[in-house]
Image: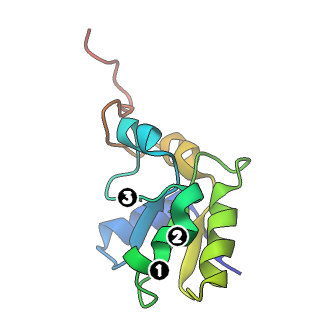
């Protein structure tokens, strides 16, 4: 079973430049619009097919979706573990939790924390 990771822990791991792959499970349009910095995009619908080709079983993998209720990250962790990946973490709360914690996002329309967009 994948271990759960909080937004604070994820930020700490990013700050310490820990070696892991952060996987955004949204469809490409949503990923291009907004995602956590450094994340790669593998939609949940393509994960089972793409993981064996694109991901190493020796790497730590951290998966996330939109929010806690969506369950995409839980499903993704289950798929990855069934494929033989053992270093899988589920970023609980996903993109919503990341933004609620005040961390920045990137993409075509990232949310700017604490500022109003220029018009």
Residue tagged by mark 1?
52
Q: Residue at x 59, y 89 (%)?
A: 84
Q: Earlier in the sequence, mark 3 or mark 2?
A: 3
In front of the other: 42 or 64? 42
Q: Is residue 65 above or below residue 88?
A: above
Q: Residue at x 37, y 58 (%)?
A: 39
Residue tagged by mark 2?
49
Callout in the foreground (3, 2): 2
| Residue 74 screen position, x and y as percent | 69, 64
| Residue 83 screen position, x and y as percent | 60, 83
Gap between marks 1 and 2 measured at Cα: 7 Å
The kind of secondary structure element at disc 1 is: helix
User: Quick check: marks 1 and 2 in contact, CB under 8 Å?
Assistant: yes
Q: Residue furthest top?
A: 119
Gap between marks 3 and 2 measured at Cα: 19 Å
Residue 87's label in the rendered image is none
| Residue 47 screen position, x and y as percent | 54, 65
In front of the other: 5 or 20? 20
108 left or right of 34?
Answer: left
Q: Quadrant of the N terminus?
A: bottom right
User: Quick check: marks 3 and 2 in contact, CB under 8 Å?
Assistant: no
The kind of secondary structure element at disc 3 is: loop
Q: Residues within 10 Å of mark 3 (few under 14, many from 20)?
A: some
Q: Residue furthest front?
A: 49
Q: Residues within 10 Å of mark 1 (few under 14, many from 20)?
A: some
Residue tagged by mark 3?
39
Callout in the foreground (1, 3): 1
């Amino acid at each position: 079973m994948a271990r759960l990771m909080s937004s604070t822990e994820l930020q700490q791991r990013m700050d310490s430049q820990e070696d892991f792959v952060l996987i955004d499970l949204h469809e490409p349009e949503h990923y291009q619009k907004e995602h956590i910095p450094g994340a790669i995009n593998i939609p949940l619908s393509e994960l089972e097919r793409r993981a064996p080709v694109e991901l190493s079983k020796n790497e730590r993998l951290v998966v996330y979706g939109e929010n806690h209720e969506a369950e995409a990250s839980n499903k993704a962790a289950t798929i990855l573990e069934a494929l033989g990946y053992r270093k899988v973490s589920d970023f609980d709360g996903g993109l919503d939790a990341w933004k609620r914690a005040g961390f920045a996002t990137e993409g075509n329309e990232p949310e700017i924390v604490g500022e109003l967009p220029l018009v």
